[in-house]
Amino acid sequence: MARIKIALIGGGQIGGNLALLAAQKELGDIIIFDIPKAEGMVKGKALDLMQLRPHDGYDTNIIGTSNWDDLKNTDVFIITAGIPRKPGMNREDLLEINLGIMKDVATNIKQQAPNAFVIVISNPLDAMVYAFYKVSRFPKNKVVGMAGALDSTRFRTFIAMETGYSVQDVTCMVLGGHGDTMVPISRLATIGGVPVTDLISPNRLKEIENRTRVAGGEIVKLFGNGSAFYAPAQSAIEMAEAFIRDKKRVIPCASLCEGEFGINGYFIGVPSVIGSGGVENILEFSLTDKEKSELNHTLEAVKKTVAETGL
Ligand code: APR
């Protein structure tokens, strides 16, 4: 069987790490795509990664290009094309520039690989994934945004740091938009099956939820230039792997809701089943009144940014 073809649209900080992780997991052959001005950079990254392969013996091909024709019949795209945040910016401040880029990317992907599975990472995420969907007219199961996977991993990290217990045993989910209104569901967070609400005081839990909501901004401030890339890359790779290996993973993702959780026509973070069919299902569950109202609040924020796309 021919190897899966994975294209990373944007070969910057996240793109480079996506390439490394995809290669190490032998997910398929990798194409790092960027604008002509950055072609040398992505060709260099590809060559550097090719030279890393003998250490672990992974047989994947990695190339860098700025030519869309090289992306014909690609199976999986992960899009990070765009600009990242600078300190003081929120994700919505990136809309104008990144929307233009996303429209161009969606048009080209549709032309080169109309049957691909597409994971969007570019921010503001909820609007960018919506824009990709609208411009490409791909089926809804083939388009998904990476946000909840990362927000949940941040929530898990902070819970593990607070308790000192293994991060491996912490499970939790963050729903809603990929912004400060996101909804960490503490009620369902557990450590080895034990509810965190029995292990962490309500006040501390609230502080952890708040830190989760602005966790990306905390890193932007520390960097001074650019935003997080290691954890975002790994989060997207888990989603890509779930698709490629038909794992039926349940991951909070920005999926198109058509009635689920009372949401209609918007991509927003909800527990999504990812397998070879793409987003195969959205798992609905009962929310408390407080969670419902928080989800409505985050939906309003998503609607506002989506409206600004004019799509
Ligand atoms: N096509 C392809 N690549 C593009 C295009 C385009 N039209 N426009 C810009 N790029 C490339 C840039 O040249 C750059 O190499 O996208 C890459 C972005 O990389 P970085 O600037 O390093 O940004 P990164 O940290 O990877 O974040 C990318 O993901 O999390 C979001 O907010 C973040 O929107 C940002 C995106």
Image: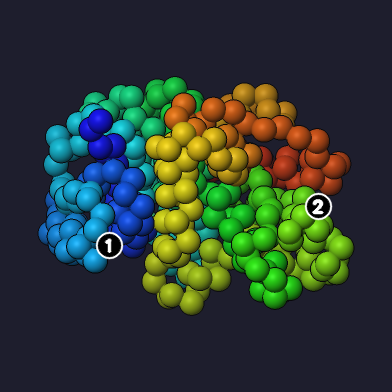
Percent position of residue 217, x then y:
54, 66
Percent position of residue 236, x then y:
45, 49
Tell me the residue at 30%/53% (across/down).
23
Q: Is residue 175 visible?
A: yes
Q: CA distance from mark 1 to mark 2?
A: 41 Å
Task: From the viewer's perspective, tell me whether residue 144 is left or right of residue 76.
Answer: right
Q: Residue furthest front?
A: 57
Task: From the viewer's perspective, tell me whether residue 166 is left or right of residue 25.
Answer: right
Task: From the viewer's perspective, tell me whether residue 45 is left or right of residue 250.
Answer: left
Above or below — where is 72 with respect to 38? above
Q: Quadrant of the N terminus?
A: top left
Residue 56 marker: 1
According to the image, what is the colour scheme of the structure?
Answer: rainbow
Q: Quadrant of the C terminus?
A: top left
**Which residue position is annotated with label 2?**
187
Tell me the residue at 62%/55% (across/down).
152
**Snapshot quadrant of residue 72:** top left
- Of residues 250 and 83, which is closer to you in this image? 250
Tell me the residue at 20%/36% (across/down).
71
**Snapshot quadrant of residue 201:** bottom right
**Snapshot quadrant of residue 142:** top left
**Which label lies toward us, 1 or 2?**
1
Which amino acid does the dot numbered 1 rest on? Asp
